[in-house]
Image: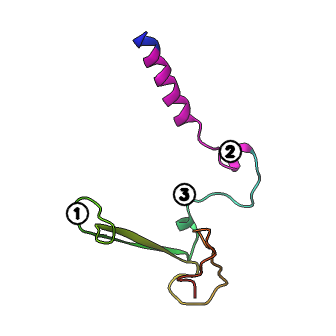
Amino acid sequence: MKFIASLFFLLIIHYSISAQKPRARDIGIPFDGTTGKFNAITDVKGVEVGYSTIISGTGKNIRGKGPVRTGVTAILPRGRNNNPVHANWYTLNGNGEMTGTT
């Protein structure tokens, strides 16, 4: 019985790992151009991507006190030459809140 349970458990793990969603190109959706070396936004000439992570404190998380783990990612579509581009914002909390967008 333990063997059957173990086998069943391993099969579930195998199928959950291999059941990732296919990429659009893999299922035949056509796109103009070809992918870059790393198939990432950093393959695009002139685009710069940066990030910063703050980790402050250790131990058990206490609400309002920490430790703190937060970060931000910046995508500069025209590099650092500061030419303006059109942008947009989206509320991710579902509250319709505009905190930090203006």
Upstream in sequence: badge 2 or badge 1:
2
Q: Position of residue 36 (x, y in %)?
A: 59, 59
Front residue (pair 24, 45)? 24
Q: Identify the residue at horizontal 33%, vertical 72% (top origin).
A: 64
> Magenta part of the protein: which range?
5-27
- Is residue 79 one of those drawn in magenta? no
Identify the residue position indicated by label 1 in the image. Answer: 58
Front in this rendered view, residue 69 or 50: 69
Whichever of labels 3 and 2 marks the residue nearer the N terminus, that label is 2
Name the kind of residue labelled 1 in the image: Thr
Residue type of the residue flagged with mark 2: Asp
Q: Position of residue 51 (x, y in %)?
A: 42, 72
Q: Quadrant of the C terminus?
A: bottom right
- CA gap, disc 3 to disc 2? 17 Å
Which structural element holds mark 2? Answer: helix
Is 95 left, or right, of 100 in this rendering? right
Q: Nearer the viewer, residue 90 or 96?
A: 96
Front one among 54 and 35: 54
Which residue does the image show at 53% across and 57% down from the upper left?
Answer: 38
Q: Of the residues tagged 3 and 2, which is closer to the observer?
A: 2
Amino acid carrying mark 3 in the image: Lys
The residue singled out by tag 2 in the image is 26
Determine which quarter of the picture holds residue 91: bottom right
Q: In the image, is residue 18 part of the stretch drawn in magenta?
A: yes
Residue designated by label 3: 37
In screen coordinates, is 91 left or right of 25?
left
Mark 1 falls on what kind of element? loop
**Colour mapping:** rainbow
